[in-house]
Image (spheres, helix red, strand yellow):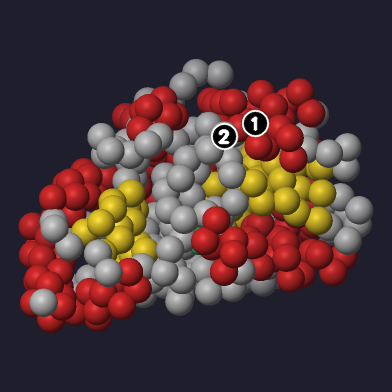
Amino acid sequence: MTTLVANDIATLAIHAGHEPDPFTGALLTPIYQTTTYRQEAVGVDRGYTYSRAGNPTVAALEKRLGALENAPPAVCFSTGMAATTALFFALLQSGDHVVVSDVVYGGTVRLLNQILSKYGVTADFVDGADPRNIQEAIRPNTKLVFIETPANPTLKLTDIEAVSVICREAGIPLVVDNTFLTAALQQPFELGAGISLYSTTKFIEGHNSTLGGAIVTRDESLLEQLRFVRKTLGAPQSPLEAWLTLRGLTTLPWRMKLHSEHALRIARWLETHPSVEAVHYPDLESFPQRELAQKQQQNGGGVLAFEVVGGIKSGVQVMNSLKLCSLAENLGAVETLVTHPVSMTHGDVPPEQRAETGITDGLIRLSVGLESPDDIIADLAQALNAFQGGAS
Ligand SMILES: *Cc1c(COP(=O)(O)O)cnc(C)c1O
């Protein structure tokens, strides 16, 4: 398998997965807004029967997402959480165990601790920054390892290559939630992982207008199982959302490059501000895992996190004073969004687990958009200065 370089991705993101319509010449795949497909004869169809099982617009998105990772067509879902749920249903049964990196999307923790636990699936959350912790947590009934790198919201990294070696020895698949970087900046399969998982809601669609999820793998039998689970559980992507996601994808490689450049600039600026205690961003010289970042990702990505001097009280004040940056739960779009993980996205993660993993009460997550970085810095400056004035 050859490694894809940035320019290949830029072309694939625009062209993979669709041919101009043979009847009309339409350049883009139409939105096939249909539930049902007329069959030629009993038992004879053209590959589509009912849109819960498959739809041509969704199929175009699936081909393109697969192509970005040199893989067969992806399986797309209505949300990222639907994708995670389907993956667990496909691979796990009662009595099974999973190892999960300790800083993951809040919904993944909720799914394991509050829903799958009722069906006899157990999970251990371990610090993936040291792969030995993952190795030690694997038991005879462990059926998969699930990591998120960089992790939401602290940006902690897990060494995909090292963990993939551990998983191969144990004979179990490694799942990488690659939502933060996407295939444009990190290629999990090139590092030995077997499954990439995405919330396409974030950078892939990139415009804060759709929900979606996707699973990419080169394992054909797993793809088959995932399509079966999707058809049965009933959470497929819809044709309109798929079309919007296809459109978002066309600019993904260039957006990721810009998101990263702007984020690095803002991270560097935040580091110099006297009211900022800590900045977490993989491309910063001060980032403890910078070497690993340089080994496995093309650059730092579009998300950073920082802590304001004075903890939660001052953090809340700063967030409430921002004007251009919107306080919101989402990330990964052209608008700069700011999130307070403890009260918003990670509210359901038990406080002890949050404390152990560095999700402090004062942590602020910034998803850097594509506005002028000078304007974002000016907004952050006025909010931080207002707080400084108020505190003295
Ligand atoms: C948002 C997100 C999810 C869940 O995706 P939804 O589309 O919101 O269901 C999973 N993982 C990560 C890293 C996310 O940021």
Quarter-of-image position of residue 277: bottom left
Q: Is residue 96 visible?
A: yes
Q: Is residue 306 above or below residue 297?
A: below
**Residue 373 tag number:** none
Describe residue 159's horizontal placement relative to residue 90 as left or right. Answer: left
Describe residue 117's horizontal placement relative to residue 282 as left or right. Answer: right
Query: For the C terminus, which image quadrant?
Result: bottom left
Describe residue 41's horizontal placement relative to residue 354 as left or right. Answer: right
Instruction: Name the residue located 19 percent from the left edge and 50 percent from the top edge.
Output: 271
The reply to whether dot 2 and dot 1 touch (C-beta < 8 Å) is yes
* Residue occupied by mark 2: 130
The x, y position of residue 42, in whole percent, is 88, 60
Which amino acid type is marked by label 2?
A: Asp
Instruction: Name the residue located 88 percent from the left edge and 37 percent from the top edge.
Output: 140
State the CA–CA distance, disc 2 to disc 1.
5 Å
Quarter-of-image position of residue 189: top right
* Residue occupied by mark 1: 132
Which amino acid type is marked by label 1?
A: Arg
The one nearer the camera, 300 or 64, is: 300
